[in-house]
Image: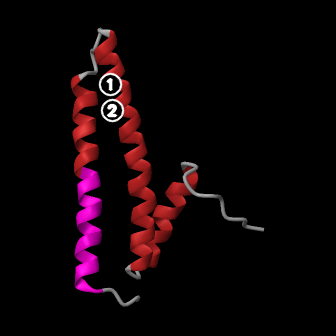
């Protein structure tokens, strides 16, 4: 396991938690606007949906990096696999 300070661990968790909170806020807006009919509401739903998807990608890739940094390699590999499957990381050449 890598040496990591308590401060770095707390900062890592707080940063990821903040992104998760923001993602949940966006998801709530998307849900609230699910039956939208006005052009403004549909545009807002689309904007929030796109921002949510971008945050999902950031969270997944960052989580894989942070887990690896923390020495939690097995969990990091699972996240990396999911990120590759989503096209967020370059595929590993398995030849």
Q: Residue at x 44, y 66 (%)?
A: 64
Q: Residue at x 63, y 58 (%)?
A: 90
Give coordinates of residue 2: x percent, y percent.
40, 88
Give coordinates of residue 22: x percent, y percent.
25, 46
Task: Return the mark for residue 45.
Answer: 1
Quarter of the figure that contains the C terminus: bottom right
Q: Nearer the viewer, residue 48 or 74?
A: 48
Q: Quadrant of residue 14?
A: bottom left
Q: Secondary structure at mark 1?
A: helix
Q: Residue at x 22, y 50 (%)?
A: 21
Q: Which residue is mark 2?
A: 48
Q: Nearer the viewer, residue 1 or 18?
A: 18
Is residue 72 in sight in this rendering? Answer: no
Q: Secondary structure at mark 2?
A: helix
Q: Which residues are magenta?
A: 5-20
Main secondary structure found in the magenta portion: helix
């Amino acid at each position: 396991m890598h040496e990591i300070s308590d401060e770095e661990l707390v900062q890592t968790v707080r940063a990821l938690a903040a992104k998760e909170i923001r993602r949940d806020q966006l998801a709530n807006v998307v849900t609230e606007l699910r039956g939208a009919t006005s052009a403004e509401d549909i545009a807002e739903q689309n904007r929030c949906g796109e921002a949510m998807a971008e945050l999902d990608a950031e969270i997944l890739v960052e989580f894989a990096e942070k887990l690896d940094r923390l020495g939690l390699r097995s969990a990091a590999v699972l996240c990396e696999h999911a990120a590759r499957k989503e096209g967020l990381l370059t595929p590993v050449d398995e030849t």
